[in-house]
Amino acid sequence: MFHKFRKAEKQVCFEDFDKKHADLKIRLHYDGLRQNEFFRLVMRKYIDKDENMMKIIDKYKDQKGNQSITNRKKSKQLVEKGRVLEKQFALNSTEVESIFDLLEEEHSEL
C-alpha cells in the first residue's frame, strides 16, 4: 500500500507577489477549494503525467526554453510509450502499487 512508504508529510512552499496570492485565494474561494487541496491536486496531476497538465508544462518549457527541443521530444516520446504500455497491460497506478505490495509480502527481505 502506498501509505507504507510515506514517512512524514512535507511542506512545499514558493514565493509570489501579494497580488497574485490574493488572486489565488479569491479564485480558490470562488471554486470552493482550499489551498492545500488545490496544490495536492496539481502535484498529483503533474506526477501522474496527466495529459492536460503535460500540455501546460510543455507550453511553459517552450516559452522559457528550459529544455532543449531534442530533450523535450524524447521526453514526450517516453511518456507516450509509457501510456501505451500502461494500456497494453491494463495497469493503472493503483494496480502497480498492489503488485509491489504483493512482492514485498513475498520477499520482505528485499
Image (cartoon, rainbow, N blue to C red):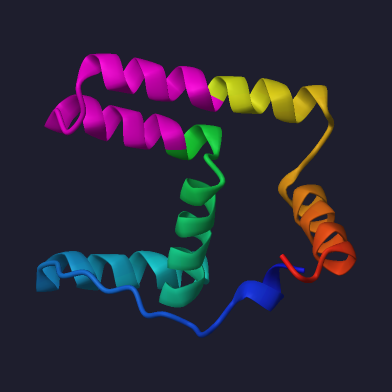
- The residue under the point 76% across, 70% down is 109
Q: Is residue 45 left or right of residue 61?
A: right
Asked which quadrant contains residue 61, the reply is top left
- Whether residue 102 is visible, yes or no, is yes
Q: Is residue 74 above or below residue 97?
A: above
Q: Quadrant of the C terminus?
A: bottom right
Q: Quadrant of the N terminus?
A: bottom right
Asked which quadrant contains residue 28, the reply is bottom left
Q: Is residue 46 left or right of residue 2?
A: left
Name the dominant secondary structure of the magenta segment.
helix
Q: Is residue 1 magenta?
A: no
Q: Is residue 12 above or below residue 67?
A: below
> Where are the magenta residues, as a range?
54-79
- In depth, the one of 62 and 108 nearer the eye is 108
Asked which quadrant contains residue 57, the reply is top left
Give how far across and how far down residue 15 sits, in percent: 15, 70
- The residue under the point 68% across, 20% down is 84
- In depth, the one of 13 and 3 nearer the eye is 3
